Amino acid sequence: MTFIHDDFLLQGVMARRLYHEVAEDLPIIDYHCHLPPEDVAVNRRFANLFEIWLQGDHYKWRAMRTNGVAEQFCTGDADPYDKFVAWAETVPYTLRNPLYHWTHLELKRYFGIDVLLNGDTAREIWDEANRQLAEPKRTAHGILEDFKVEVVCTTDDPVDSLAQHKAIGESGIGTKVIPAFRPDAILKVDQPELFNAYCDKLATATGRSTRTFDDLIAALKSRHDYFHDRGCRLSDHGLSYCHATFASEAEVVAVYEKARASESITPREKEIFATHIMLLTGRWDAERGWVKQLHLGALRNNNTRRFKNIGADTGFDSIGDWSQAENLSRYLDRLDQDNHLPKTILYNVNPRENYVLASMLGNFQEGGTPGKLQFGSGWWFLDQREGMEWQLNALSNLGLLSRFVGMLTDSRSFMSYPRHEYFRRIFCNMLGEDVAQGSLPGDFEMLSELVRNVCYHNAKTWFPFT
């Protein structure tokens, strides 16, 4: 039997029935990812397996570095095939790491390759994958079609023109590709050089001045409106923790003026400025009927030397250990007091916060909107089997699993769509084990509805873009 066989990860009759008869063929709604819109706009054809599989994949780079692979084979200028061989030689060392599962699941689903990847099999796998990548339908559009991807939500800066999204909309692609509003850069008021450059970019993008604080807010609001008019229905924020240091607008204005004068900003000043911006965007999201996503807890760019040499998002981030509960409660409560709390998804990257976030949801749920607040699927370091199971268990114990909007890729790679299959197999197996243990009834129709909802239908009906 091959490693990735039909019943991979599925133990027992009920798990197999739920997956094969219900989950397996459901379409995908990928409501948060980092796919480059330009790749979809031009219907990119990938020249080789390196381009589609290793380029930009910091998960693989971390493993390769840990295995002693030199940086030139990760982010450097080595030949693409040599980089692939370096990865292939690393794969046998990833046993029990999710990369081992993902690697072979992706090879099987994209190319029908059942061979285990290692240094000895690298050449045959490289040649076969490249042969298939040259076929007419093996483009960005073809991949989205093959995996039945109905919706993709990219991650976009407010200053982006969204020209690529316009081109995508005119391309005839069957997948709906939607931008998401990610204003993280506007919160970096404590880095005046970067902040002022960004304010200037915002002024250019809007044709408005950003000289005063009121000008800044008007310009940012105009981009929120601009995104809405072009189909955006989600905002997204990558935060260490929620900002909840409330202050008068006069104090916030004073912080802005200091930053624009390139003066040093104190930690408290950064907090009151970021809090104010987050409250404004929350209100705008609620008024427009958008979904707000809060990605909490990542400790980014830990390696200063590497950050200076090769930049962000290259594999030097980790789990942070900030306290989340009090600030998160205060932020959500302030929006709720004014009846401006939008539909919200909370993601944590530190597993110790699972029960914090899962319990926080219940404080702000509201009749008339099932599952208004969502505990997001296992994210980043938690989007592996154990992390998914922890998230599902916490949500089950403290909320309503049946209202969960399910999995996403959170990926920069077009090779990542089998992660939805991975989640679905894990989910069906959990339910099957519960039935075998007698903790759930063996009612196939009832469990089928749960699987169908969590894997597809909840996302289709909960998000405002479908």
Image: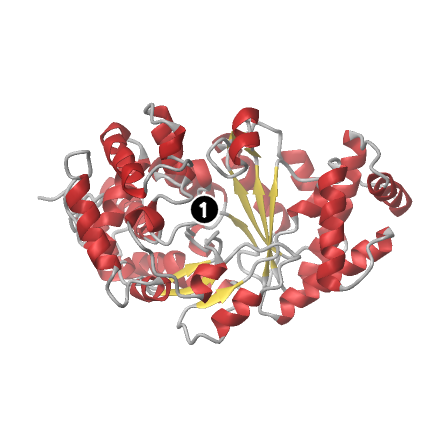
Q: Nearer the viewer, residue 203 or 344?
A: 203
Q: Identify which residue is drawn at 43% across, 63% down.
A: 40
Tell me the kind of residue under disc 1.
Ser
* Quadrant of res 146: bottom left
Residue 440 appears at what percent x and percent y?
Answer: 31, 47
Q: Count every numbered label the image shows and give the total.
A: 1
Badge 1: residue crowd in 10 Å (few <14, some 14–19, many ≥20): many
- What is the quadrant of the N terminus in the image? top left
Please indicate, yes or no, whether residue 244 appears anywhere in the rendered image: no
Q: Is mark 1 on a helix, strand or loop?
A: loop
* Quadrant of res 220: bottom right
Q: Which of 418 and 463 is in front in this view?
A: 418
Residue 328 in the figure: left or right of residue 114: right
Residue 210 in the figure: left or right of residue 188: right
User: Going by the picture, which residue comes out furthest to the left?
Assistant: 1
Q: Which of 189 and 240 is in front in this view?
A: 189
Residue 392 appears at what percent x and percent y?
Answer: 41, 43
Residue 3 appears at what percent x and percent y?
Answer: 16, 42
Residue 262 appears at what percent x and percent y?
Answer: 82, 37
Mark 1 = which residue?
A: 377
Please indicate, yes or no, whether residue 284 appears anywhere in the rendered image: yes
Residue 308 versus residue 438 in the image, above or below = above
Q: Nearer the viewer, residue 208 or 374?
A: 208
Residue 66 in the figure: left or right of residue 438: right
Please say which color scheme the image uses: secondary structure
